[in-house]
Image (tube, rainbow, N blue to C red):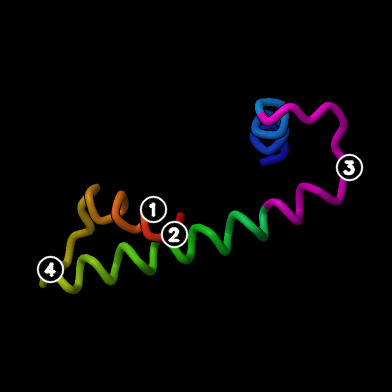
Amino acid sequence: SEPAIRCLARRGGVKRISDLIYEDTRGVLNIFLEKVICDSVTYTEHAKRKTIAALNVVYALHSSG
């Protein structure tokens, strides 16, 4: 949501935010989450499980940088 994106930007030190930033930020976050989820599923399938464990997400986040 816009307030959440604004809060993250403020935490990063941004003072003014353009209206176009919200849509761009949603796109970037969507791509990042898709990659992390895909990597988490890969780790889970490799372990021959059907439930994603928290550690799989941690490993996926480490691999994505």
Left or right of 4 in this view: 46 = left
Q: Looking at the rendered structure, which numbered label has been put on residue 64?
A: 2
Amino acid type of the residue that numbered disc 1 sits on in the rendered structure: Leu
Amino acid type of the residue that numbered disc 4 sits on in the rendered structure: Ala
* Residue contact at pointers 1 and 4, CB within 8 angstroms: no
Q: Looking at the rendered structure, which numbered label has been put on residue 18?
A: 3
* Residue contact at pointers 2 and 1, CB within 8 angstroms: yes
Q: For the residues marked 2 and 3, what is the alpha-carbon distance in whole angstroms?
A: 28 Å
Instruction: Determine the secondary structure under disc 4.
Output: loop
Looking at the rendering, which quadrant does residue 63 occupy? Answer: bottom left
Query: Vertically, is 24 above or below 19?
Result: below
Amino acid type of the residue that numbered disc 3 sits on in the rendered structure: Ser
- For marks 1 and 4, the one nearer the N-term is 4
Amino acid type of the residue that numbered disc 2 sits on in the rendered structure: Ser
Q: For the residues marked 2 and 1, what is the alpha-carbon distance in whole angstroms?
A: 5 Å
Looking at the rendering, which quadrant does residue 17 occupy? Answer: top right
**Foreground mark, 1 or 3?**
1
What residue is disc 1 on? 61
- For marks 2 and 3, the one nearer the N-term is 3
Q: Nearer the viewer, residue 57 or 1?
A: 57
Q: For the residues marked 1 and 3, what is the alpha-carbon distance in whole angstroms?
A: 29 Å
Bounds of the magenta span?
12-25
What residue is disc 4 on? 47
**Residue at image coords 31%, 62%:** 40
